Image (cartoon, rainbow, N blue to C red):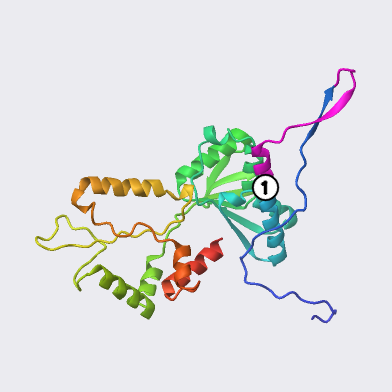
Amino acid sequence: SSSSGTTKRQRPRPGLITLEVDPMLTPPSLSPVETPSGKLATARKRTTKIDKAWRAYKRVNQIFREKVVEAYNEGDLIWIHGFQLALLPAFVSRRLTVAKVGLFLHTPFPSSEIFRTLSMRVEFLRGMLSADQVGFHLYEYARHFLTTARRLLGVRHTYDARGPVINVDGRDVVISCMHAGVEPADLADVATTEAGVNAVRKLRAELGLQADDDPTHFSAEDVAGKQQTRVIAGIDKLERLRGLPLKLLAYERFLDARAKRRDDLQKALRDREEEEEETGGEDDEEVATRGGEEEEEEG
């Protein structure tokens, strides 16, 4: 407690900001229509599935806003991930006018011709532009976003040391391109731990690999008279935007080119829920534990 008698809130870890709840859902809009008697009556417009989905989408963003406001401390950076929370920058900035907000999209941003087909395109775009910085994986996606903002909202961008900058109502919105991926150095550190070494030793034993076998690379030609085992690993969520069809297509083309490998596939999928059931919900390998923590923080 301070000398004035007020209670000082314990400061949480900086930078973590999530949700909020607005108790309202916009009711179906009403419009006047003329009745046979000539009097105006109010008719209720039909609510479509898209209307309901959009209201639910806004509701989720409002819930996140409340949690963000609750956790925010002066000086914190609010970093929002994913198109699922594209409206959150706008909701947060109305409550926390001095907060710095960043938004990063982990998925491609469509061309303006595709984006303009959305009925809620303007509100969606303005929500994103309420952030101080918007990040994309590739410049191609950023270029689509810049073009869409110009064609739909009439806002133009300039370039400076920060990169493309859009001026929105006198406020700069920086557009950034940054590649997100795994950190090889961190993975190498995990692999050298006791749990990592034991996991590799166990896998090599299950596959019958010799000490000099490297199962992560394919040689131009198989060694004569030697059965080679190769490992192709992937960690993906079964979601439409994860690119799994492309991965499977690549593997199909590999099998077309190397027909003798078609009978070598032993395990196709490993489900995380199945693994948790087998381990009682606890990961006994540091790699699995670390991966679970990172997924929770990102979510």
| Image x and y of residue 49, in percent | 65, 38
Q: In this view, does 58 lie above or below 150?
A: below
Q: Give the range drawn in magenta.
A: 35-58
Q: Tell me, yes or no, if residue 169 can be seen here.
A: no
* Secondary structure type for disc 1: helix
Q: Tell me, yes or no, if residue 147 can be seen here.
A: yes
Q: Residue at x 76, y 38 (%)?
A: 28
Q: Which residue is drawn at 37% across and 66% down?
A: 184
Residue occupied by mark 1: 56
Q: Judge left or right: residue 251 versus residue 209.
A: right
Amino acid identity at mark 1: Ala
| Image x and y of residue 117, in percent | 58, 33
Specify few, some or many for label 1: CA neighbours under 10 Å numbering under 14, 14-19, or 20 or more. Answer: few
| Image x and y of residue 207, in percent | 25, 68
Q: Judge left or right: residue 32 versus residue 20.
A: right
Q: In which image quadrant can residue 199 be found?
A: bottom left
| Image x and y of residue 187, in percent | 38, 69
State the residue in front, 295 or 8: 295
Q: In which image quadrant can residue 73 be found?
A: bottom right
State the residue in front, 215 or 181: 215
Q: Does the magenta stretch include residue 204?
A: no
Q: Which residue is drawn at 33% across and 77% down?
A: 197
Q: Is residue 53 magenta?
A: yes
State the residue in front, 271 or 249: 271
